[in-house]
Amino acid sequence: MANLRQSKYADLLPAYNNISYLEGPARLAKDGVAINGDLIKAPRFVVATGARPAVPLIPGIENVDCLTSTSALSLEALPKSLLVIGGGYIGAEVAQMFARMGVKVTIVCRSHLLPAAEPEIAEALSGYFPTRVSN
């Protein structure tokens, strides 16, 4: 992960004028962002939270060879099929990518695709996925 953060942010951002890369604990504050205890004021901020993929707590999942969104991108050969647990933006992105490479993909989600997105966006994207709903 450290290498990914280095290549996505620290190495890339200095090439752009008027962009500073700061790393450390941060919080939103009045008139800016407090990072490492210092108040930074600017008209715009990009906050990269550094989220990590997590394996869901499903009984028996430790007995199967499962992938995360990160480890799936490191595969050297395509699987015949893939079950994606979660219909959020990362799950949808991974599913779409593998499907376009010829992998049979099934997405399992609690409610519907892109639950955090505007309903119109989720509905439009759902039109690109063959759908079968089971309760």
Image: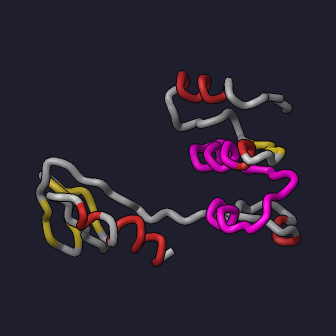
Residue at the image point whose x is 87% and y is 68% from the top: 64
- Residue 93 among magenta residues: yes
What residue is drawn where x is 62% and y is 64%? 70
Question: Viewer-proximal residue, 16 or 48?
Answer: 16
The residue nearer to you, when weighing 29 against 114, is 114
Please name the residue shown 79% across and 64% down the image. Answer: 77
Please determine whether, in this image, residue 125 is positioned above or below residue 67: above
Dividing the picture into quadrants, the one containing residue 60 is bottom right
Q: How many dots with numbers?
A: 0
Q: Is residue 62 left or right of residue 128?
A: right
Query: In this figure, which colouring scheme has been used for the structure?
Result: secondary structure
* Residue reaching furthest to the bottom: 2
Q: Position of residue 104 (x, y in %)?
A: 83, 45
Residue 71 percent coordinates (x, y): 67, 67
User: What is the x, y in percent for residue 110?
Assistant: 71, 40
Q: Is residue 90 magenta?
A: yes
Which segment is the magenta one?
Answer: 69-97
- Between residues 68 and 31, which one lies in front from this camera angle? 68
Q: Quadrant of the C terminus?
A: top right
Residue 106 screen position, x and y as percent: 80, 43
Snapshot quadrant of residue 55? bottom right
Q: Is residue 52 above or below residue 127?
A: below
State the image quarter where residue 26 is shown: bottom left
| Residue drawn at point x = 60 percent, y = 44 percent | 88
Query: Is residue 92 left or right of 29 when viewed as pictured?
Result: right
